[in-house]
Amino acid sequence: MVKKVQIVILVIIVTIIAIIKIGDVLLTDFMCGNEILAESVSRNGKVKAVIFDRGCGVGSSDSTQVSLIANGKKLKNKPGNIFVKSGKGNVKTIWLDDKVLLIQFTDALKIYKQKNTYKGVSIKYEYAHL
């Protein structure tokens, strides 16, 4: 009997956690918005780097982000998949070759995400005066 009660309690806890996580994801996407600032297509034309500002409403700080997506695809209302910095703007992307992307940035109080590789693309970073 005690085991059954423990299992029921565990199932309830897991269900509550799942509902909270799903609600958090749905609310974040609903409340946030991306404003595309620039796009740069790789030399082979397969992927593009998209620079965008992301805001999530009153009380949240804006950030400038970069995502790598397939060329021809639209940016989804999601956070950047390779680079996220505090503040708006001041980011530039330069393709050094088909598989190497340089991200230049300035005025970042905090870097939240900074990937060195993503789906076969090498990513380099450079603090610059833009």
Image (cartoon, rainbow, N blue to C red):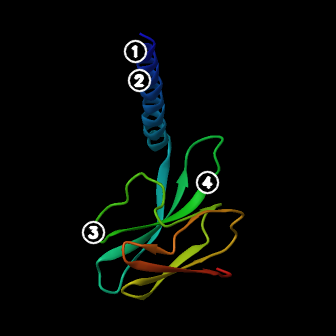
Whether tag 2 and tag 4 are in contact, CB under 8 A, the answer is no
Residue where numbered disc 3 is placed? 72
Q: Residue furthest top?
A: 1
The crowd level at tag 2 (other Cα within 10 Å; few <14, some 14-19, many 20+) is few
Considering depth in this image, is 91 or 9 the residue closer to the camera? 9
Q: CA distance from mark 3 to mark 1?
A: 53 Å
SS state under label 2: helix
Q: Identify the amino acid type marked 4.
A: Asp
Mark 2: amino acid: Val
Residue matched to label 4: 62
Labels 3, 2: front one:
2
How many angstroms separate mark 2 from mark 1 (CA)?
A: 11 Å
Q: Earlier in the sequence, mark 4 or mark 1?
A: 1
What residue lies at 46% left-to-right and 25% top-to-bottom?
A: 16
What is the secondary structure assignment of the residue under circle 1? helix
Sequence order check, earlier mark of 3 and 4? 4
Q: Nearer the viewer, mark 3 or mark 1?
A: 1
Looking at the rendered structure, the kind of residue marked 1 is Lys
Helix, strand or loop for disc 3: loop
Residue 113 placement (x, y as % from top left): 57, 63
Residue 38 in the image: state x and y as whole percent: 46, 71
Q: Residues within 10 Å of mark 1 (few under 14, many from 20)?
A: few
Figure check: 55 above or below 104: above
N-terminal-most mark, 3 or 1: 1
Mark closest to the chain's N terminus, 2 or 4: 2
The residue that disc 2 covers is 11
Q: CA distance from mark 2 to mark 4?
A: 38 Å
Residue occupied by mark 1: 4
Q: Amino acid at mark 3?
A: Gly
Between the C-alphas of marks 3 and 2, the distance is: 43 Å
Q: Which mark is residue 116?
A: none
